[in-house]
Amino acid sequence: MTTAFREHLRRGAAAMRIELTDAQADMFLAYYRRIVEANAQFNLTRVPDDPAEFIDRNLLDSLAPLCFDMLPEGCSLIDVGTGAGFPGIPLAIARPDVSVTLVDALDKRVKFLQGVTDALHLNAEAVHMRAEDAARTPNMRESFDVATARAVAPVNVLAELLLPFVRPGGAMLAFKGPGAQEELEDARFAIETLGGGCVRLEQAGIPGRDWRHSLVLVEKAASTPEKYPRRAGMPEKRPLRT
Ligand code: SAH
């Protein structure tokens, strides 16, 4: 298993033009083992039976922004609703120059993540908070170069959960499926209201898979008005609309 895991990971990453050292491949394997182990104790995340599918769906998918130069050297990144650590942990393993903050509302998941970042000595920390509350703390508000999320909410909701964390000049980065374009159209008002600017949409391919994943990068053009994000639960319950 160990050799097959490393092989599949290295081959996939190479096809995406991402170079991984042996030490990094070992870290991905250690991370995978910790996930499988934790999942036997509590509901951490869905783990496919086939390790190759886990690699493609979670590890390589998380690394897709590296194919588009979306993370500047030495940037700070916050991953909101990170769950078992996607995309934040794979990005922290592949890019040790990026300082990663992992946020989740579920304490068990955050404790698991802290264990991973300690064991692997990652340039990352895990925070147990709801995004709506975290974005109001002065040391986190408008403090990150990039705020990202995968499988958390539609783009109009994500704009309110992510843009308040981003300093003007930075960007929010949403991992999306085939419906990204429609979600973006629904999110125009929210993006503008929250200080978002130019939008870039990229199709993110995983080698050998026909999944139609995409990445939505929204630049932060202006400061987010003080009243956003609204209190916990509201962004999802009443998404910003004209
Ligand atoms: N990003 C991961 C997990 C997606 S599941 C992945 O792609 O696999 C969604 C996660 O977001 C859950 O762990 C949930 O606890 C968290 N979450 C949902 N809304 C949140 C909020 N407002 N603030 C913080 N975490 C949130």
Image: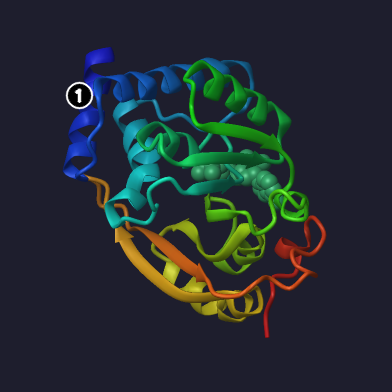
Say whether residue 133 is left or right of residue 95: right
Question: Which residue is depicted at the point 79% across and 64% down?
Answer: 230
Q: Position of residue 232 (x, y in %)?
A: 80, 55
- Can you tell which quarter of the image residue 70 is in? bottom left
- In the rendered view, would you say 33 is above or below 173? above
CB of mark 1 near ligand 1 (< 8 Å): no
Q: Is residue 233 at least partly visible in the picture?
A: yes
Q: Position of residue 160 (x, y in %)?
A: 66, 65
Q: Position of residue 195 (x, y in %)?
A: 61, 74
Front in this rendered view, residue 54 or 159: 159
Q: Which quarter of the rendered image does ligand 1 occupy?
A: top right
Q: Is residue 162 at least partly visible in the picture?
A: no
Say whether residue 170 is left or right of residue 227: left
- Report the label total: 1
Going by the numbered disc 1, the residue's amino acid type is: Glu
Question: Which residue is depicted at the point 42% across and 22% down?
Answer: 32
Question: Which residue is depicted at the point 52% across and 35% down?
Answer: 85
- What residue did someone put label 1 on? 7
Question: Which residue is depicted at the point 35% across and 35% down?
Answer: 94
Could you classify mark 1 by the number of other residues whose Cα lies within 10 Å: few (under 14), some (14-19), or many (20 or more)? some
Q: Position of residue 8 (x, y in %)?
A: 22, 28
Q: Residue furthest front?
A: 74
